[in-house]
Amino acid sequence: MPHKIGFVVVSSSGHEDGFSARELMIHAPTVSGWRSPRFCQFPQEIVLQMVERCRIRKLQLLAHQYMISSKIEFYISESLPEYFAPYQAERFRRLGYVSLCDNEKTGCKARELKSVYVDAVGQFLKLIFHQNHVNKYNIYNQVALVAINIIGDPADFSDESNTASREKLIDHYLGHSSEDPALEGSYARKSDYISPLDDLAFDMYQDPEVAQIIRKLDERKREAVQKERYDYAKKLKQAIADLQKVGERLGRYEVEKRCAVEKEDYDLAKEKKQQMEQYRAEVYEQLELHSLLDAELAESLPYDERPLPAIRKHHGEAVVELEVSDANISIARRGGMSGEPEPLTEKALREASSAIDVLGETLVAGAYSKTWSYREDALLALYEKLMEIPVGTTKEDLKNTLRASIFLVRRAIKDIVTSVFQASLKLLKMIITQYIPKHKLIKLETAHCVERTIPVLLTRTGDSSARVRVTAANFIQEMALFKEVRSLQIIPSYLVQPLKANSSVHLAMSHMDLLARLLKDLGTGSSGFTVDNVMKFSVSALEHRVYEVRETAVRIILDMYRQHQASILEYLPPDDSNTRRNILYKTIFDGFAKIDGRPTDAEMKAQRKAAAEEAEKQKKEEIKALQGQLAALKEIQAEVEEKESDAVKPKNQDTQGGKAAPAEALGIPDEHYLDNLCIFCGERSESFTEEGLDLHYWKHCLMLTRCDHCKQVVEISSLTEHLLTECDKKDGFGKCYRCSEAVLKEELPRHIKNKGCNPAKPEKLANRCPLCHENFTPGEEAWKAHLMGPAGCTMNLRKTHVLQRAPALQPGRRSAVAASGLSGSKAGSKIPTPKGGLSKSSSRTHARR
């Protein structure tokens, strides 16, 4: 009957790291399969050796979603390939080929499962992969194969030794006993029947553990049919159908968990893991309730995670016997023992002699039994025995009973069966919270209970079973908060003991987590936790090899800092650059800064960097603006020099007529007369270089001012025109018809209505000062007298400073300003500023040299 044939990978032409051809030997939802090297040469080749010489009936290929070969060829051989044994091997015989879809219709999101029916005998199978289909995802031109499945019949063997060898190989590669008929299908009389359980899709989309259970149940179904137990076979059939859905769902969870891990989304991975555990537990519980799951079906489950056996008594039905030694024992009644446990060994008699004297040999024998249900029964019986002890019993008897009970509790806490472990915790809780208070025993007895059990409880927090770890940690936390235990301050002293270097990862993580939780519950005041012992423990934990332990230690230190502030710093190295090279200490000190409301080191660096970048940017903008100003000045200077050259002849004539030119009057050659001269106010200074004049215009010149709205430097005489026509905020100004000045539009109606402004005179009759709002003599020279003279404008803020700083104007400066060609408010406009750049009309109003 055709069935799944195991195989090993003999060779491959190459593979990408992490995607070896040996991955094809595993069938599970999370397998990655084989990938060719990046930018490989084609064709690529894989050679498989089947575990036996067989007649291949069916080949199944699961292709990658986008690394797809255009064609795959198949070859078969009876013996090793030529390059392994060139003198005795035969050549491969070609079987044919299959073409694979380019997957464009699915957007390269789905994987193609290709089934090929063949009829060929051999033991070696060669696959040849041709050029890949091109798509936008396959950027390295690779081909891949996620899985391959071989289904066939064993070929005839001439002797029994060959048959035994064949069965051994099957057992080794398929992982079940040689008598296991699970893969032979449900219809033994049909020689060509292939079981759905042998199909590649079954293993690739099923949880491996559930798939194994399904195969076992399928075997039982066939046995039930042979024995004509059709009701049981029907139940098994339905269970198999339900389990297939369960396995697919668990397989999907496993894939989603793997994807979350690859994306480092550990919260989602944890959630998927919990979903799987919960869902699996629910399903197994249902199987157990229907008498379909026992210890044999759970091969892969940890012993303490297995479901409890169910009561198998059904009226009118045959009972399916369990294949475990203690399976015929029913669940113990809470009221007492069921049957008799095996006698105590000589070693157990010596070890438990004191407990036997107090509690009796029968109960202690149950606690020592190899059958877990007897051990659980013993603890339940002891629970009831302690609850029934009357008040008034002598203190000596009460004390002896407590000591003997704690001896058995301590032993049961170590039990690998979860139900026994949980029964021990229930008994311990009752002893501390009910037995001791009821009989008014001293605190020394409570301390004995805690000190004898807390070390083994802490050990169970590192158990391989997540359920046991969580149960143990939660109970320790609960016990530490018992009012009878809390005042003893015993448990905190155990939790601040340094972690052992060889302790397991689970134990160290549970230890740290438990410490963090109890610190929040108990604090550091009269609880056994002190700043000193907690900080010493946490600082030492920063050196632990497990990341989660170090991370929890950081969290504890930060929580301690919130409560105790500066005293915590005594236990840490100084906050300097050397210390901050350690990422943990950097995290801690940054956490301190956040708690204090200070910027972290990274934030301070970012602020300094931003400030430096802003200063550099501002400096570059000022330099750019000044360069623009200098360029404009040179252009204007050239225009002025050209005009002056045209006026040389008239000036010479005037000189010949007895009138000296301004340059000659000052002893300055004509071609250098405008050097070091401000053409607005007429001041001359050796400091008036290109940069010096820029500074003079920007801060000191009495004829100029800075616009409060756009920060441009403009002539005071043209300030009103600037605000109305050129300023960046010009849309916000309007002109008063009475005083002719620029007023903010939102204030203009009130300004006009108040009639408080001084009316302006026509331009030909008077100039209008936008600073003091006065009318004065018309003409350009009048502006200089008004703005620079001591009796002029009282609102020119630059005037007082400049008059105190500068000497009186030298003769000839008045004519120099006139020679510059400026015409007051008509010709003048903005002066470019270091920040604002050049204005629209700067080319005709900028200072000329």
Image (tube, rainbow, N blue to C red):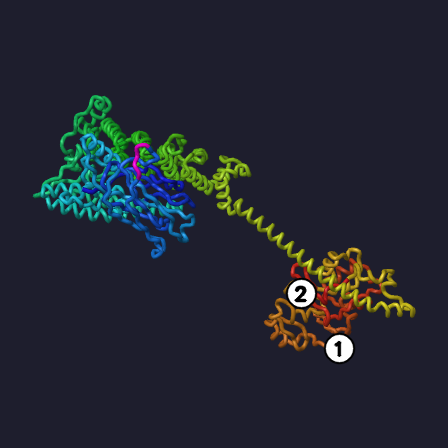
Snapshot quadrant of residue 674:
bottom right
Q: Could you tell me residue 21's position as x and y percent?
A: 34, 40
Q: Is residue 679 above or below residue 580?
A: below
Q: Is residue 578 above or below residue 621?
A: above
At 56% across and 46% down in the image, what residue appears?
605
At 88% across and 63% down in the image, what residue appears?
665
Q: State whether residue 423 appears in this view.
A: no
Q: Is residue 40 above or below residue 398?
A: below
Amino acid residing under circle 1: Lys
Q: Could you tell me residue 576's position as x and y percent?
A: 55, 38
Q: Please, what secondary structure does the residue beneath circle 2 have?
A: loop
Question: Circles 1 and 2: CB distance less than 8 Å?
Answer: no
The Cα–Cα distance between marks 1 and 2, rounded to whole angstroms, is 28 Å
Q: Which residues are magenta?
A: 87-91
Q: Could you tell me residue 590's position as x and y percent?
A: 50, 43
Q: Is residue 724 above or below residue 494?
A: below
**Between 411 and 841, which is closer to the camera in this rendering?**
841
Q: Which residue is mark 1?
A: 764
Query: From the viewer's perspective, is the residue at label 1 or at label 2 nearer?
Result: 2
Q: Which mark is residue 483?
A: none
For label 1, the crowd category at 10 Å Cα-Cα, with few meaning under 14, some 14 to 19 and many 20 or more, is few
Q: Is residue 303 magenta?
A: no
Q: Which residue is mark 2?
A: 839
Q: In the figure, is residue 338 to the left or right of 717? A: left
